[in-house]
Amino acid sequence: MHGHGQIFRLDLCGQPARNIREVPHRASPLAPFRHGTFRTLWMATLASNLGGLIQAVAAAWIMLVISDSHQMVALVQASSVLPIMLFSLIAGALADSVDRRRIMLAAQVFMLVASVGLTIFAFLGLLSPWLLLSFTFSIGCGTALHMPSWQASMGDIVPREDLPSAVALNSMGFNLMRSVGPAIGGIIVAVAGAATAFAINAGSYLFLIFALLRWQPPGSPRTLPREAIGRAISVGLRYVTMSPNLLKVMLRGLLFGFGAIAVLALLPIVARDLLQGGPLTFGILLGCFGLGAIGGALMNTRLRERFNNEAIVRGASVTFALCALTLALSRDVWLSCAVLLLAGSCWVVSLSLFNVTVQLSTPRWVVGRAMSFYQTATFGGMASGSWIWGMIAESNGADRALMVAAAVLVASALIGLYLSLPEFSVLNLDPHDRFNEPELRLDLTSRSGPIMVMVDYEIAQQDVHDFLAVMTQWRRSRIRDGVQQWVLLRDLENPDIWVESYHVPTWVEYVRHNQRRTKADAEIYARIIALHRGPHRPRVHRMIERPTVPSSDDTPIKTHPEIH
């Protein structure tokens, strides 16, 4: 929709909702550069990405030298993305509960140490295939720790209206380096050897480490203890599973990643066996893929104006499939380069759209975990795909593996006919920040519980249908934010009285649940209040459970009640 106008949408629950706001004029795709912190971190990330891509070319090519197995070559790509699948959930939970800047610093220092080790072993000529995979896996672990915190930090660095542009610019920056980094890496490997390429990558981490040390993110006072990692992951999983549209995005990301990774995983073999080239040819091919990705990033905004999300991803999947098929049949370097330009564009258009959809559809308190689940799905598809395409190439050749991958991408596009992607959510997911912890006469600790909460509503008979409809949305919101055993009760003797009942494990979880409420949640609750006919606001009963009868009062009354 262009200009100003009313917009209707489905919220994350899949429920129709009224128009929320007017759509502003399209922001400039370069708007995030107005913010100094974004500029600094973006440029430092650019240097780090350049080093990483030089390292990737060197690792893939040196594997061709020290191993004659196609599967081992494909595993270089798998070893880089497998840690993201394995450790993203923990990294996402940390991103939502620990200082994200410190997490990113720790990740960068860890990758620096691993890269220095890889450089030393390469210079000494001690690298074996499995040792090389161990080093690339270690660097991937650092990436897995860094990514959820970096992506979740976008909302702290730029305002919400600039978030889609910031995500696109991050993608464009990576692919800008992908357009030149592989070619540079190929030249370095051909002239100075892989060890020199690894040393350059080790030095590239220093730029981002320095930028992160200078960045002082806005602090927010922590009034509650941190969630345990296990519970944080569980809460994040509950939020995602109660959000059907997020599940669609993750499934589509997994399928696209599984099929599309075949091109990148098998590209060293394509360069050597199908095109009869060397490391420079491989670098040029990767550079063309990155150059095409830059074009895709620049086209993103215009594509979203003209087509809905499902049409974009479906078209990108089919086009990528045609590119993979052409790459399998081509024996001409320039034709393969042209095909990779188009493939790179489809790659970034799809993945950036998945990324933005998850970020705009998730409140700040859980965005790190939501991104980690998305990354687990997408990079899990890439890791398993790299391994499977490598096995197929080992027994049937890289060209046959690319043909099968093309068929998988077409199938993923057809699945979109039944599981279409949602449009970007326009729900206001900013914190509501209206909850005041109630005065308690019992002397509770943060771990006291379980807590049972009941809320009384008085609903006229003619409003029951509307009340049940809005309570369906309210139930999903409550459960997503951490409550358990939610039920709706109706008084048999006074049918106008309805009682909402739910449990939370401890008092601190009750407070945390209420602090998670967003402005979109507040709109749902306002609709409930509008249907309430009682003389006062709904009565809230907060009670601590006692499964057995204690021999003495184990929760004494405060002598001097305090208001928190």
Image (cartoon, grey):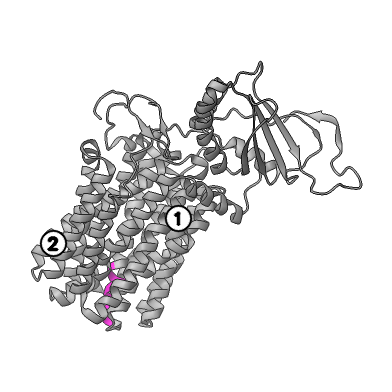
- Say left or right for 175 vs 280: right
Work out whether residue 489 or residue 287 is closer to the camera in this orientation and state it.
Answer: 489
Q: In this figure, what is the number of numbered marks?
A: 2
The residue tagged with tag 1: helix, strand or loop?
Answer: helix
Please state, as top left, top right, bottom left or bottom right, where the C terminus lies in the image. Answer: top right
- Amino acid type at image mark 1: His
- Say left or right for 348 vs 449: left
Any mark on residue 146, and which?
Answer: 1
Residue 206, horizontal then vertical, whole percent: 41, 57
Please state, as top left, top right, bottom left or bottom right, where the N terminus lies in the image. Answer: top left
Is disc 1 surrounded by few (<14), some (14 to 19) or many (20+) residues within 10 Å? many
Q: Is residue 280 magenta?
A: no
Q: Where is residue 424, by image quadrant? A: top left
Q: Is residue 459 visible?
A: yes
Any mark on residue 337, and which?
Answer: 2
Residue 372, horizontal then vertical, whole percent: 45, 53
Q: Where is residue 461, by image quadrant? A: top right
The residue tagged with tag 2: helix, strand or loop?
Answer: helix
The main secondary structure of the magenta stretch is helix
- Say left or right for 251 vs 190: right
Residue bounds of the magenta highlight: 57-65
| 482 w.r.t. 199: above or below | above
- Amino acid type at image mark 2: Cys
Tell me the residue at 9%/71% (across/down): 331
Work out whether residue 410 or residue 390 is closer to the camera in this orientation and state it.
Answer: 410
